[in-house]
């Protein structure tokens, strides 16, 4: 069987569930042929075990120029990853970038930032209270916490956040043309190039300044800064806003997070699994590979549905339920293997602080509009909400 297009439509009134067709495909044929808009015929993988296996297999490449994309309007050919982008290259380039960056985002180092994250979180909550309801949780809370942290870590001026946000939104939008995406990326790249030169001349004790002592070129440093900035705020912003939306639609889970102090770690992992906002993944076979009883030929693109994998009942019982007490160990929201998200520990610490703090400060938080009126960010490769109007007593 060949699936004619990547399932994308979510059921009306179910903004947290993946397209139902993904589940039917997973149960019927967890690796199946997929027709791409450019005429390529590759594969769609939907089970947890097989998605994880592809992520971990070096016979599958992340190089952009080898991939076909399953989205309408996607170009038939992609350019290679720009210098400094670790997500679109394989070893040895990826290994070189990864070694330089891993030490900057260790679990220990991220935990040392706890006090600063708590301080920023408290400032945001206090500002919300002083402003009074209703507020847009995206603007007031979900966006400033990760944006301020990644700017401080990298040494990027927070005052320029609107510029970064505007261009990151364009780069990740399915509705923007390739020309618009390229221009938005280049605008941030040019900005970062100037910042790199300033850091080389006068280091300021941040991650970007530290990296100027490595063998990275100016273009690579600018590319890494561009990549880390976007990855460091956009995904966590979406998780905080969409996660709050999900909690408000599951009031028993919202209440549990407020009354059980030790639930935060579990809650974050379960929300990551349940929402799976970064989807899908893509890899290109470098050689013929047998997977799940199918022969994938060299050059074929494999689309990895993280959403379907994280809702696989073979891995997570009752997967469509949000259960903050669940041990969601093994979810693939951050990917798996050598390309697993570099900033995952920072994101975890931010969410473990921000979710319980919000519930504790505003235990009567609720939506300020009917749930169907919350504008969903569903035409981008990071799923979420554009706004989340909330109120409280």
Image: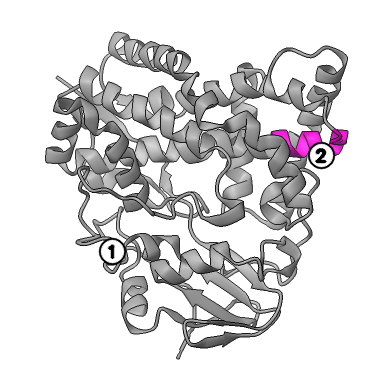
Range covered by the magenta-colored residues = 215-225
Q: Is residue 174 left or right of residue 321?
A: right
Measuring 34% from the left and 43% from the top, which residue is drawn there? 269
Distance in Å between CA atoms under marks 2 and 1: 42 Å
For label 1, the residue is: 11
Q: Is residue 159 left or right of residue 126?
A: right
Measuring from the top left, give residue 86's x and y in whole percent: 70, 48
Q: Is residue 286 left or right of residue 263?
A: right
Measuring from the top left, give residue 359's x and y in whole percent: 23, 25
Within-10-Å neighbours for mark 1: few <14, some 14–19, many 20+? few
Measuring 20% from the left and 55% from the top, which residue is drawn there? 321
Tally of marks: 2
Whether 324 is among the magenta residues is: no
| Nearer to us: label 2 or label 1 | 2
Measuring 28% from the left and 39% from the top, which residue is drawn there? 267
Residue placed farthest to the left in the image? 252
Measuring from the top left, give residue 189's x and y in whole percent: 77, 36
Does dot 2 land on a helix, a strand or a loop? helix
> Quarter of the image containing the C terminus?
top left
Looking at the image, is mark 2 or mark 1 earlier in the sequence? Answer: 1
Tell me: residue 98, above or below residue 281.
Answer: above
On residue 220, the disc is 2
């Amino acid at each position: 069987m060949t699936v004619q297009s990547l399932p994308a439509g979510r059921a009306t009134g179910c903004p947290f569930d993946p397209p139902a067709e993904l589940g039917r495909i997973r149960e019927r044929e967890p690796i199946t042929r997929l027709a791409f808009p450019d005429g390529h015929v590759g594969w769609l993988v939907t089970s947890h075990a097989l998605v994880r296996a592809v992520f971990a297999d070096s016979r599958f490449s992340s190089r952009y120029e080898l991939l076909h994309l399953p989205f309408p309007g996607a170009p038939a050919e992609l350019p290679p990853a720009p210098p400094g982008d670790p997500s679109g290259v394989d070893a040895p380039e990826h290994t070189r970038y990864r070694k330089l960056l891993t030490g900057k985002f260790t679990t220990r180092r991220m935990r040392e930032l706890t006090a600063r994250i708590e301080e920023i979180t408290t400032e945001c909550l206090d500002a919300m209270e002083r402003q009074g309801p209703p507020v847009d949780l995206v603007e007031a809370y979900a966006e400033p916490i990760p944006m301020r942290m990644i700017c401080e870590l990298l040494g990027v001026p927070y005052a320029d956040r609107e510029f970064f946000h505007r261009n990151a939104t364009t780069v990740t939008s399915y509705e923007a043309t390739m020309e618009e995406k390229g221009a938005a990326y280049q605008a941030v790249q040019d900005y970062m190039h100037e910042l790199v030169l300033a850091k080389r001349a006068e280091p300021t004790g941040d991650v970007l300044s530290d990296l100027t002592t490595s063998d990275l070129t100016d273009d690579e440093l600018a590319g890494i800064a561009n990549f880390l900035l976007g990855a460091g705020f956009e995904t966590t912003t979406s998780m905080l806003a969409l996660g709050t939306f999900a909690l408000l639609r599951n009031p028993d889970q919202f209440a549990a997070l407020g009354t059980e102090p030790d639930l935060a770690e579990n809650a974050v992992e379960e929300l990551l699994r349940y929402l799976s906002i970064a989807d899908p993944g893509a890899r290109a076979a470098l050689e013929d590979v047998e997977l799940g009883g199918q022969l994938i030929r060299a050059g074929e693109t494999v689309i990895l549905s993280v959403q379907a994998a994280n809702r696989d009942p073979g891995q997570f019982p009752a997967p469509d339920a949000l259960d903050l007490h669940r041990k969601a160990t093994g979810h693939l929201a951050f990917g798996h293997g050598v390309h697993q998200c570099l900033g995952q520990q920072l994101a975890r610490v931010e969410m473990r602080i921000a979710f319980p703090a919000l519930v504790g400060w505003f235990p009567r938080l609720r939506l300020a509009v009917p749930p169907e009126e919350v504008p969903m960010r569903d035409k981008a490769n990071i799923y979420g909400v554009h706004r989340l109007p909330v109120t409280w007593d």
